[in-house]
Image (cartoon, rainbow, N blue to C red):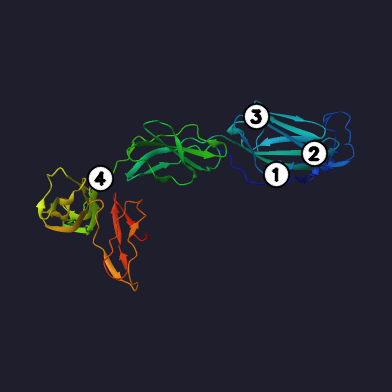
Amino acid sequence: METATAPEVASEPTLKVKEASPADAEEPQTSPQLGASSPFPQLLAPLEEQPKIWLPRALRQTYIRKVGDTVNLRIPFQGKPKPRATWTHNSRALDASRVSVQNGEQDSILFIREAQRADSGRYQFSVQLGRLEATATIDILVIERPGPPQSIKLVDVWGSSATLEWTPPQDTGNAALLGYTVQKADTKSWLWFTVLEHYHRTNCTISNLIIGNSYAFRVFAENQCGLSDTAPITADLAHIQKAVTVYKTKGFAQRDFSEAPKFTQPLADCTTVTGYDAQLFCSVRASPKPKIIWLKNNMDIQDNPKYRALTHMGICSLEIRKPGPFDGGIYTCKAVNPLGEASVDCRVDVIGKGRTPVLGCSPLLSPQVKSWGKDTSLGGEGLNLLPSSGPFITVNIGMYLRSHFYYQLSHFSLS
């Protein structure tokens, strides 16, 4: 099938005047209705209006239609008396089986019911009045979808990318190609997705493919009518494989957290009252975990039910249950592990109810002690202050343990 090529802009209507031959000068002009053979030759009617074609603006450039569309062109013209209108296609007479022409008093209609690519070309319309003639040229281009590209193949696959190549279609649909559309589909779903549109080259690289999938590709050609009806598919699949990665770990020295026992909080001396439980606390740090041993006056008390020893998160505690007068002494906490040992100790004093502790006194200037005092802050159960002979005294007592709580003995009433 031939491809019609036409310039973008058609020529303007032109008016031509035919030259008269010597034979035309000798013979009188006759009416075209009667003809020269008439026994009564008649002269032409006087020319009232020169022939002229009014070409629509839309037809002054290439008139493009798709295959199967209707072509209906109406060309107005003027001239008096009525001029003779004629059509030609590529300088040849029209095919009456495909193209119909209807001439009126002031226009001419060219009609094609279903346009085919063979109807493309240059159409020339002319109106003639005597020796005067006006012509107009109309370029018609009938186009259709292009054919599919050819020889598509998968060139290379590396990483998560694939390279494709193909050749242009043999049939461009009687129009210039606008580009190519590339699509991909994985073999799991076979759903096609567009990755490139209006692409002008005949090779491309598709990137960002999913590792572990296999892909097929196809390419459409595109012109002014649209995409080609079919598209070739690559014969080979692009298998995106996971790259083998070898990890080499760098050697490093394991940090040694081993540590000999070390007490971070020592035991504190305390004084308790007979019959009231007392507790001793200290904290130790060591790795590996140390063994805790409690001693009283350098004697192991681990198996003595009177004492309860606990260790949690490095906090060591010893509970003395209802201590008696003989539970006082030096208590020692010893921590032992393979790296060494450490120990802390404290003094525990146990006093009975109603007994007088050792008090520190300082003499004042008062000449004598009128009476002795009693601690009223303990609800009447305080200590009797026995005055010594001599001047008035002042008692300096720091802390007094009662039921595991310390009270400040600072208020006394004298009577």
Mark whose residue sits in front, 1 or 2: 1
**Reading the chain from its start, which is encountered first: label 4 or label 3?**
3
Label 3: element kind? loop
Mark whose residue sits in front, 1 or 4: 4
Mark whose residue sits in front, 3 or 2: 2
Point out which mark residue 77 bears.
Answer: 2
Mark whose residue sits in front, 4 or 2: 4
Q: Which residue is mark 1?
A: 60
Mark whose residue sits in front, 1 or 3: 1
Counting from the top left corner in percent of width and height, residue 108 is at 76, 33
Q: Amino acid at mark 3?
A: Asp
**Reading the chain from its start, which is encountered first: label 1 or label 3?**
1
Crowding around mark 4 (Cα neighbors within 10 Å: few <14, some 14 to 19, many 20+) is: few
Counting from the top left corner in percent of width and height, residue 281 is at 23, 53
Let me know if residue 250 appears in the view: no
Q: Which residue is mark 3?
A: 95
Q: Amino acid at mark 4?
A: Val
In the rendered structure, the answer to whether residue 187 lies left or right of residue 222 reads left
Let me know if residue 132 appears in the view: yes
**Reading the chain from its start, which is encountered first: label 1 or label 2?**
1
Q: Amino acid at mark 2?
A: Phe
Quarter of the image where one finds residue 338: bottom left
